[in-house]
Amino acid sequence: MNGPGAWRSQGVAPKIVQLKPETHSVVNFYNRCKILDVNRLQKDIGPTESVVIKDESGHLVGFVLRNFCPDEALLQWATQVAKMQIPVRRNIRKEDTGKLVLMGYSAGSRSKTAFDWVRNITKKMSDEQKAASDMAGSVLFAVAWQLMKSQVPQEVIDDFNDFVKALGIRRMDKEAGGNGGKADVAPRDSGDGKVKVSIRGVEQGRGRLGLAVGEEEFEFDNVELAPPSGVVGQNYSSYTPGAPPAQMGCIVDHGKVTECQGFRLFSGERG
């Protein structure tokens, strides 16, 4: 099975929201408790609504995706793999609430830059266990990348691809040792369960992706692998005092509609 169409959600296409240029400020921004001018609110995004937000010139401002992963079994698999990474890897944002761990490639420290596979496992593990953990993370991001390519605005996908191409860096292509690049990874939180994952035959950022979800095993040929690095987080939050966002992002809802009444969307200069 090939191509991003295999990963496409069958949900309703996001609506397009256009922002007016004159509503670009937030009152008392530098206080932790920000005062919002409600007269400048332009759109209430409901708890089940997906939207793409553009300015008057048609440039992408942001987007909200609901039900990003509609398959419950795949979502449980992804959650299981993510939970395996959190307790065994170093937190990259120790000053904030929760935990973020880096997966894939790293540019190294500021004092000693070097583009190489991240070495952030803090627990005592064998080389085979480390390789299996790296493989599980690589497959997790490869699956997420296929979902993104079928649902996220093309401008964002192009931004990632242009960045990788311009720098000539590798995609997240770590291969587990032994068994033809296939690894059986024992989840830390589920007794005798197994998460079977593999990335094989990697060439020019593409490879054969294999994973087992529930009782079924899947294999996809010629899959474009994820960009070189990403983070797995748990209960993470951070206060942003005034720095502008570095890149576009999204709010992802995993198909669980809670009691929240949606988001109050406004356009501001920062944050």
Image: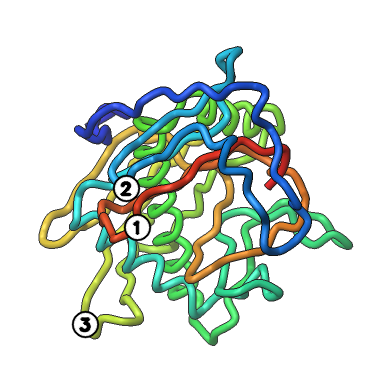
Q: Residue 239's x, y, as percent?
A: 67, 63
Front residue of this view, candidates 195 and 247? 247
Q: Residue 70's x, y, as percent?
A: 22, 46
Gap between marks 1 and 3 measured at Cα: 37 Å
Disc 1 marks which residue? 260
Mark 3 or 2, which is nearer the eye? 2
Q: Amino acid under label 1?
A: Cys
Gap between marks 3 and 2 measured at Cα: 37 Å
Q: Amino acid under label 2?
A: Pro
Disc 2 marks which residue? 47
Q: Amino acid under label 3?
A: Asp
Which residue appears farthest toward the left when viewing the image? Answer: 215
Name the residue at 38% across, 56% down. Answer: 181
Q: From what the image shows, is residue 205 above or below residue 36?
A: above
Q: From what the image shows, is residue 190 above or below residue 49?
A: below
Which residue appears farthest toward the front when viewing the image? Answer: 39
Q: Residues within 10 Å of mark 1 (few under 14, many from 20)?
A: few
